[in-house]
Amino acid sequence: VSEAPLRVLLVDDDDDIRSIGELALVEVGGMPTVLASSGAMALEVAAREQPDVVLLDVMMPGMDGPTTFRRLREQPETASIPVVFVTAKVQRHEVQRYLDLGAIGVIGKPFDPMTLPDELRAIMARARERG
Amino acid sequence: MSNGEADPERGADRLRELRARFGASLHERLERLDVLVGAARSGTSEDALDEALVVAHRLAGTAGTFGHVEAGEAAAALERALRRIAEGSPDPCAKDEAAGDEAAGDEAAGDEAAGDEAAWGEAMTALARVRAAASSSGLG
């Protein structure tokens, strides 16, 4: 029995990243995907769509990624949705900071659109193993 | 939520389209970056440095993702240099504290100016690298 595809919410203020990210997730990974261009929009879309995972950009104007993450945790309907940060800041201490916040993983920018879905699946699998 | 039917062939076609669109927009982005960095360095616009940081940050994230790794790395170097300049802006509290010791204050101001100058040098080098990388990819 094949596993149901991951349903993803991709949050990024950059149009180009949303376009190529959606392409990678949908066309390459076969993952139904919904987009948000801001933290505020992400809170609303996550509550409505109940994705399996949120791919969340760290640096966004207005509500940044970490603030959006905290707000997602505060909303009962989005509190348990796993979050993966997407960021250019991938030094070990920065990655650890995002994991300490409660993210299940970090994906670096730039990312390879052809391998992004596999990277996301691997992060989800490791998170499931950790329980 | 969009349909999740994988179609690698259609994906490859769309990826080519997106890359072409990104390439076509790169020239405009580089011109904007030139203007903003120039305005920030000459001090003619208070917001130019912040805006240049946003453009450099976006370019650093997107160029590599669209396959222009060298342009992306140069944009990341530009972002780091601009951030150092932004974060090295004189801190009014630090100035007040240093006011009691004129010699120390002068020395600190000299170090700050030299640091700023070095960071601007790095920024201009990185900006030239972004242009060169875009140009060698047939973009910009």
Image (cartoon, helix red, strand yellow):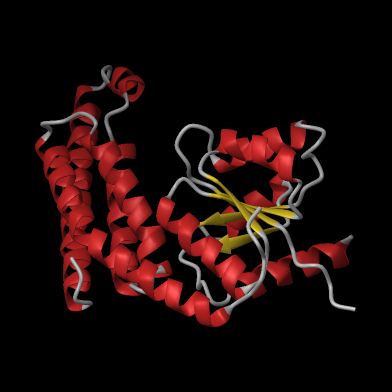
Percent across and percent down for residue A69 are: 66, 41
Image point (57%, 53%), residue name: A94
Residue A88 in view: no
Give the side of residue A76 with respect to residue B133, left or right: right
Give the side of residue B1 with respect to residue B18, left or right: right
Residue B101 in view: yes
Give the side of residue A63 with respect to residue B136, left or right: right
Percent across and percent down for residue A26 are: 61, 67
Image point (52%, 39%), residue name: A38
- In the figure, A39 relative to B22: above or below? above
- In the figure, A86 relative to B52: above or below? below
Front-most of residues A3 and A39: A3
Image point (51%, 71%), residue name: A113
Front-most of residues A44 and A102: A44
- In the figure, B23 relative to B122: above or below? below
Percent across and percent down for residue A108 are: 53, 63
> Which of the 4 image quadrants contains residue A72?
top right
Percent across and percent down for residue A117 are: 63, 71
Name the quadrant of the C terminus of chain B. bottom left
Give the side of residue B25 with respect to residue B6, left or right: left
> Which of the 4 image quadrants contains residue A42?
top right
Instruction: Count all numbered tags in the image, as a single digit.
Output: 0
